[in-house]
Structure formats: C-alpha cells, structure tokens
Image (spheres, rainbow, N blue to C red):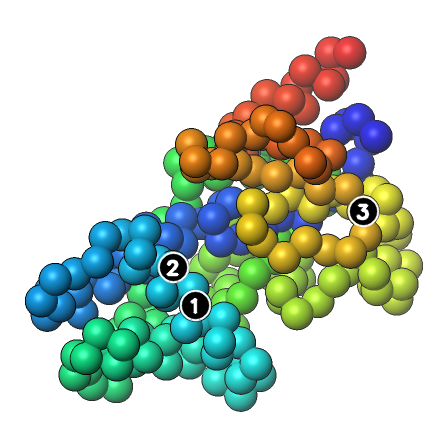
Amino acid sequence: MRLTEYQALLIDCDEVLVDRDSGVWAALQPLLENHGEPPDKARVLVEFNEVLQGLYPRFDELGFSGLLCFAHRQLAERWKLKVSWEEGMSFARSAAGWTLFEDAPGAMLYLRKFYRLLVQGDRDAEDRGVLCERLGIEQEDFISLASDPRQDPVWLEANGLETEAILQVTRPGARLQQAGAVCLICRSPDNPPQPCASDYCISSMADLVAQHQLSLRR
C-alpha cells in the first residue's frame, strides 16, 4: 500500500517521538557522578535497557514509575553505589519531562490531518495527560505496549478500522507487532535506513512527512 492509503498510524512513543535515551542519560548524571570510572553513554544505556527489560514481568505490580525506580537501584547495585529510594523516585519522575524529538510536534500536527494517530508506550496515568497534550492526541489514543490493537477484533470494530489500514511506526530493535505493515524510523546514523527489511525505512518523523507529501503528488 502507498502511504496515503493507510487510515491510522501506530507510533512508538519512546525513541520515535520522545527522546528517551537522552532523558535517561541526563537523569542518571547524579548517580554517575559517584561512579569512579563512569562508562560511556552507549554502555550506560545498554545496561539500563537490560535491567529494565528484566523488570518488565513486574509491570502490572510496579507501574512504569516503579520499573524506573527499581532499574535505578539495580544499576546502582551493579556499579556498587549506594542510593536512596528518594533518589530512585526522582529518577523515575524524570520521565514526565523527557523531551520530544525536535521534528515530532510538527510531524504530528501534519500527520493528524490525514491519519488517526495512535501512540504506543508505557506511562503512568498521571503522566499521560500532559504527554498526550504535547503530542496533540486524545488520551484514548495512547495505547499500552501490552496491547496490540491490530490483533484486537473488538477494538478494530469499535474504531472502524482494519488491521491492514494501520501502519506501525517504530524503531530498529523494538518489538514488532505480528500483523500489518511496518515503517522503521532509523534516527541513529548507526542504523541507516537502507537496506530495508520493512515496508518503509526512513530517517525521522520529518522524513515521514516528506515521504507522505511525495506520495500525495503521485
């Protein structure tokens, strides 16, 4: 299908719209200041992702803020550093202020003229309202990572959509949905958009807008 033929976009929140890695790196600085030989940014983020993924089975129990708090504590234990729970919660609350990529607001403003915009991510209820306002979407269109709307016939019928009409917009290395087309946003120069094993591989949300405009002209 051409880009103009989809009815909805299912967009990853973190690392497509929200610069999570930069937010995590900045929020970890107080902890890293106590590290004798702090690892580089890439290594820190790899370790953070490892501990966070290990905690995800407890998501229903802890919520997103709880996961971040425990991930902070486990990183401190890995690095043999002492931290308080207050420091862990301060790190967890930083998620509310993680910045959007520069092109995200403008891209969302443009794309919502042509698509139903669904954003998929993990946030606690108290953070969703502000984030949805920043992204220009309704709170009902913020969908948990635990859900897969493209394989939920009840949701699809209620929203007047079919699986084939929804394009997943995600990033390299993310969990792909099992059905439907995929557009990879390859922001990192280490993950060039070509060769592309997905339906679309582009470099940014701004590039997605440009590709959509090209498709309109054809």
Which residue is identified by label 3?
180
Which residue is identified by label 1?
50
Residue shown at 73% from the left, 34% from the top = 199
Q: Position of residue 132 (x, y in %)?
A: 53, 55
Q: For mark 1, give the secondary structure.
A: helix
The reply to whether the C-beta atoms of the residues labelled 2 and 1 are less than 8 Å apart is yes
Neighbour class for label 1 at 10 Å: few (<14), some, many (≥20)? Answer: few
Label disc, if present, on residue 66 of the rendered structure: none
Q: Is residue 195 above or below residue 60?
A: above
Tell which of 44 and 136 is nearer to you. 44
Which residue is identified by label 2?
46
Q: For mark 2, give the secondary structure.
A: helix
Q: Amino acid at mark 3?
A: Gly
Marks counted in the figure total 3
Q: Amino acid at mark 1?
A: Glu
Q: Amino acid at mark 2?
A: Val
Q: Is residue 162 left or right of residue 215?
A: right
